[in-house]
Image: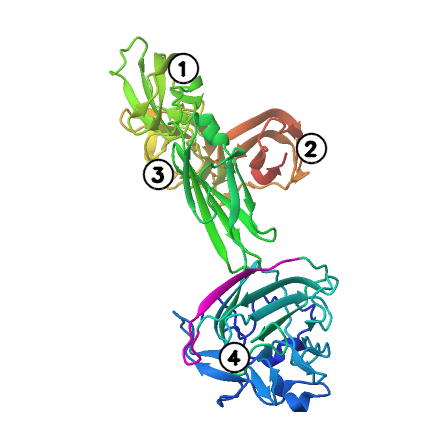
Amino acid sequence: MNTRIIRCLAGLLICLWPASHTFAQYQLTNPSFENWDGTASSARPLGWSSFPQADGTYASFASTAQHAHRYGGRPGTAGASFVTIWTRSVLGVKANGNMTTGQVHAGAMSASSSENYNYTHRGSTYCHTFSGTPDSMYVWVSFYASSSSSVAAVRAYIHGNNDFRDANDVNDGTLYRGKAVAQFTRTTSSSSSRTWVQQKVPFVYDGFSSVNYILMSMTTNTTPGGGAANDSLSVDDIEFIYSAWLDNISINWDSIDDFQRGRMDYTDTVDTYSLLQGSTVQFSPQASDATVTVDTLWLNSHTRQFQLHVRAEDSVTTRTYTVTLVGPEPPCDTVRDIQTQVYSNRVNVSWTPGTSNSAYEVEYGPAGFAQGTGTTLSVSNQVLLIDSLEYSTTYQLYVRAICRDTVYTDWVGPVTFTTDTQAVFQCPSPDSLTLDTVSYTMASFHWYVVIPASDTTDTLNPPLPCLPPYDVCLLQGTDTVSHVQLGEGENHYTVDSLLPGTAYTFAVSTICSCASGELSQPVLLSFVTLRDTAGIATLPVSPSLTLYPNPATDMVMVECAEAVESIGVYNAQGQLVRRFDGLATDRPAISLRDLAAGVYFVTVHTHRGTASQRVTLVR
């Protein structure tokens, strides 16, 4: 049987589900008659019933089975079973074979009486909930009848929340929504053989009810009591078909001329690249309850593809139509609006891309250079930083775009720019040299470290080229007592073996060039060792210090236990960014208005020592 058919082994439980349940039923239960309630030839296919399950006044007279479990099936089947019903004659009265998803009601002896019908018995095991509105019913049949004019039938009625009766209610559109009726004459003239034929019939939706249940009926004759004894109808693989077809496809509202519903791939051309870029696809599904999603792909620079995925109401049946549009190669437009911004001996170059640009080449050289002899750089975006240029030099620059392999635009340029004049290098001296402690034979000092700037072109704070960064010298009068070089970041030093009661001068310089031995101007501090030997005298170096507000936005108030002579403000890298001198007050106010947000260190200097505290500046 067709593997796409939804099966349910628990056929007897169908109508225990309320009609409003979220379970969606789009196919019959046991539509291929693979599942039975026993192994006897008279066993009942699950989800179906016949005369032995009938109700009504004459149910007992109709209790003899007129159906059988058969093995095999229609051509190409993967299943193992089908069902056969037949006509029985009792005392000359013919009872047509009958099977239904509902229940047989035997209410009269006369076969043509309106008291005999199949009906959806809601609330019982003889009903079949349903949710879909299929487009067609496919069913395989093999029909033998002694008369070539006998007509058998397989009927489906989708109806609302009522006990629909076949055939009493088939003309009342308020009770049903749609119907599919397959009628056929005999397919074989031999009662000992079967000739299978697939019947395909559309559903006609001419009713107005809701969709809650489906009632299936199969009979050996459309005329009650018609035909002859032993007329037999075999049925296999009832499948409801949901449309996932399109009725038409248009590109830019122009219908595809050679469209066919069953043809899935199309190719068309457009005249211009802009039309290719702006093309849209339109479509109409065959079934109004189908959904269509569209994926748009670029297969290459001039080929675009629309994939239309059609999904039927059952969410199982899907098809994909593909429309490929081919246009001309996209234009390869030049760049425009080239801008240069010079920073010392480097330049930042930017430009506006043209259409279809994918990469760029930049060629530059001294003003007047011949193209092809300059320096060429390749970049993937429209910004380029060129550094290590000559100072005080005028350059020319050209830019061209690459659109695709071997396709280049013309060069745009030249654009002229001139680098800055090189600043005279000034080796920075250490800052705030302080005597920390002094005794009769020892003294210790510290100062602030000069940290190289991260920007290698910063002419105000150039980087120190090598280590160690400090040169320290101790003098007694004009004589050198000691001379050493300290390592990077060593901003403190202690000298010992001094003479008591003796005047000395301590000098520290920054080492700015190892190769040339260039030193900054020295910072000097004179001191006198103690005269007695009572022990070490320590100078107070951390007077009480308070800063507020902290965090600060502009002004910072400084409160100190003694008069402040000067204040230095250092950034997180240890660079001096502000200095305030000649204060002579224990509550000075300092402005940090022009500094960027961040962490700073405020160091106050008094006649007795220094103190430092961190402050956070916010914006």
User: What is the magenta range?
Assistant: 189-205
Q: Around disc 2, counting alpha carbons within 10 Å, would you say few (fewer than 14), some (14 to 19), or many (20 or more)?
A: some
Of badges 3 and 4, nearer the viewer stands: 4
Q: Which residue is mark 1?
A: 420
Residue 145, position in %: x, y?
Answer: 50, 76
Q: Around disc 1, counting alpha carbons within 10 Å, would you say few (fewer than 14), some (14 to 19), or many (20 or more)?
A: some
Q: What kind of residue is marked 3?
A: Gly
Q: Which residue is mark 3?
A: 487
Of badges 1 and 4, nearer the viewer stands: 4
Whether residue 3 can be seen here: no
The mark found on residue 270 in the picture is none
Q: Around disc 4, counting alpha carbons within 10 Å, would you say few (fewer than 14), some (14 to 19), or many (20 or more)?
A: many
Q: Report helix, strand or loop for mark 1.
A: loop
Q: Report helix, strand or loop for mark 4.
A: loop
Give the mark nearer the N terminus: 3 vs 1. Answer: 1
The mark found on residue 587 in the picture is 2
Of badges 3 and 1, nearer the viewer stands: 1
Give the colouring mode of the picture: rainbow
- How far apart are the two marked residues, 2 and 4, measured between alpha carbons? 119 Å
Q: Which residue is mark 4?
A: 231
Give the mark nearer the N terminus: 2 vs 4. Answer: 4
Q: Nearer the viewer, residue 33 or 610?
A: 33
Of badges 2 and 4, nearer the viewer stands: 4
Residue 336, position in %: x, y?
Answer: 44, 18
Give the mark nearer the N terminus: 3 vs 4. Answer: 4
